[in-house]
């Protein structure tokens, strides 16, 4: 009876954190037949204490019922054979009476041929009678069989087999979707397979999470959060889904919320590098640069080559005015990933702030070769060109940035400044006004606008 020791089944009463140890053998009992000692102490089955046994007796009963069931199946099979024998008699009778080859017909005498013709002429009537009677018997027996199956609850086996097939199909579809997600980075195709898996089992956690992650990779951050939440409704501590939600919130610029969800991950796994980075980058975007560096350093203490954390630290150092250190950190990130766009931008922007405009343009161009719509690199290039006096080229770059984000204040200011340098004061004021409408506290733009207004006044006085 060592099988009992291998069982680790929790009590059906969800309020009891115990394993089952007892079984009730009373046929009329309506309570849980398998239960724990706590159920017993609370008075379950008190009305029939003599029918309570440990689980060893359950194994004996199972063996006994198994043997009886095998005998029952044999008896039922004998009935099936008797019915099949009767069908066989009918089959052979039809063949003997109604199926004749030309050779057999020519061997019949006049009396036999006369009788055979009589049978053939009455064939339709006989066939209808056979089908009618067999159909009626068949319907009667099928009705009785269905009644037995329902009343005796014998369809459970079919349900089990169906569930097993569905589980296998769900797992197969998930594996196909996951392979497309993980190996081929084909996120749209991955989602198709995952959706099929979720039609079969809407609560399949791996499919739910992988769909959320795929949507995040496609930039559909709101949808990614919706699907991550579906996992978290089932398992509130699912780390991967918490990470996906935190990172999606960051990408949606909901930085405070991103920090909250990153913290949930870090409560479960304090060394989760991705969440340490998400928190660091969110702090940076909230202009908490010193804190951002602290959290980026925590990530780097676990993985010194985590390129995104290096990039966050580099950007934070730059925004604190330490441009040479920022360049050094950006170079470290680029040694790991030479195509890391944000690090290319950090280096370009740091060079611009060090007034190394030609070098700044060169590194901004490297970023734009990888991502032609990287608006902050376009802005760095535009501002560097302006500082070199290449106003027309600078305006072209600023316009490209504004096509991506028409409310990007820095590019509006740069375009206005270029137009101002070209003595197009009215046009410059137009772009300055747009920038001020978006950010009324931008003193640099306000001062530039005042300069243009004074220049226009001088013209009018002439």
Image: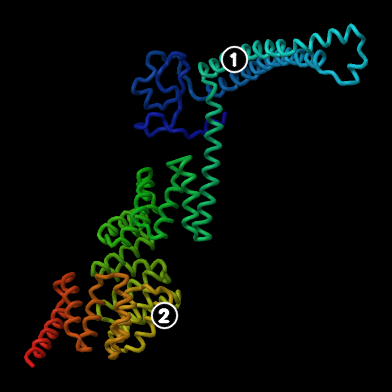
> Could you say which disc has been placed on residue 139 in the image?
1
Q: Residues within 10 Å of mark 1 (few under 14, many from 20)?
A: few
For the question of whether residue 182 can be seen, the reply is yes
Q: CA distance from mark 1 to mark 2?
A: 79 Å
Residue 319 to residue 112: above or below: below
User: Which quadrant does the N terminus fall into?
Assistant: top right
Disc 2 target residue: 366
Query: Where, by quadrant of the figure, is residue 329 drawn?
Result: bottom left
Q: Residues within 10 Å of mark 2 (few under 14, many from 20)?
A: some
Query: Where, by quadrant of the figure, is residue 269 drawn?
Result: bottom left
Query: Where, by quadrant of the figure, is residue 77 drawn?
Result: top right
> Could you say which disc has been placed on residue 107 in the image?
none
Could you say where residue 394 lies in the image, as x and y percent from the top left? 30, 84
Residue drawn at x 37%, y 25% as measured from the top left:
39
User: Which quadrant does the C terminus fall into?
Assistant: bottom left
Residue drawn at x 59%, y 15% as measured from the top left:
139
Could you say where residue 205 lies in the image, as x and y percent from the top left? 43, 46
Q: Residue furthest top?
A: 111
Mark 1 or 2, closer to the camera: 1
């Amino acid at each position: 009876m060592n099988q009992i020791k291998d069982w680790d089944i929790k009590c059906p009463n969800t309020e009891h954190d115990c394993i089952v140890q007892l079984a009730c053998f009373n046929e009329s009992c309506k309570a849980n037949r398998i239960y724990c000692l706590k159920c017993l102490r609370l008075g379950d089955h008190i009305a029939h204490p003599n029918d309570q046994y440990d689980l060893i007796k359950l194994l004996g009963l199972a063996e006994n019922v198994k043997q009886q069931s095998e005998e029952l199946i044999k008896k039922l099979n004998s009935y099936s054979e008797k019915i099949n024998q009767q069908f066989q008699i009918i089959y052979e009778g039809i063949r003997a009476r109604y199926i004749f080859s030309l050779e057999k017909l020519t061997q019949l005498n006049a009396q036999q041929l006369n009788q055979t013709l009589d049978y053939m002429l009455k064939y339709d009537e006989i066939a209808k009678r056979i089908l009618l009677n067999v159909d009626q018997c068949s319907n009667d027996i099928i009705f009785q069989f269905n009644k037995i199956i329902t009343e005796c609850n014998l369809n459970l086996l079919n349900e089990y087999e169906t569930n097993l097939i569905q589980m296998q199909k769900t797992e197969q579809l998930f594996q196909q979707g996951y392979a497309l997600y993980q190996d081929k980075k084909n996120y749209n195709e991955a989602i198709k397979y995952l959706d099929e898996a979720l039609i079969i089992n809407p609560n399949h956690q791996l499919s739910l999470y992988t769909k959320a992650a795929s949507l995040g990779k496609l930039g559909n951050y709101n949808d990614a959060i919706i699907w991550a939440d579906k996992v978290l409704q089932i398992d509130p501590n699912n780390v991967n889904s918490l990470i996906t939600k935190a990172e999606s919130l960051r990408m949606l610029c909901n930085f405070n919320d991103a920090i909250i969800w990153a913290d949930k991950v870090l409560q479960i796994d304090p060394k989760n590098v991705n969440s340490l980075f998400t928190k660091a980058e969110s702090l940076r975007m909230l202009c908490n640069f010193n804190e951002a560096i602290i959290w980026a350093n925590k990530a780097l203490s676990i993985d010194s080559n985590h390129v995104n954390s290096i990039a966050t630290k580099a950007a934070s150092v730059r925004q604190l005015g330490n441009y040479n250190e920022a360049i050094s950190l950006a170079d470290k990130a680029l040694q790991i990933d030479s195509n890391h766009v944000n690090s290319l931008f950090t280096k370009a922007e740091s060079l611009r702030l060090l007034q190394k405009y030609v070098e700044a343009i060169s590194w901004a161009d490297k970023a734009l070769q990888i991502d032609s719509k990287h608006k902050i690199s376009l802005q760095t290039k535009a501002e560097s060109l302006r500082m070199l006096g290449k106003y027309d080229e600078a305006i072209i770059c600023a316009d490209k940035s504004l096509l991506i984000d028409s409310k990007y204040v820095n590019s509006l200011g740069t375009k206005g400044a270029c137009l101002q340098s070209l003595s197009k004061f009215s046009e410059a004021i137009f772009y300055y006004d747009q920038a001020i409408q978006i950010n009324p506290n931008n003193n640099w733009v306000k001062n530039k606008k005042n300069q243009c207004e004074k220049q226009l006044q001088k013209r009018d006085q002439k």
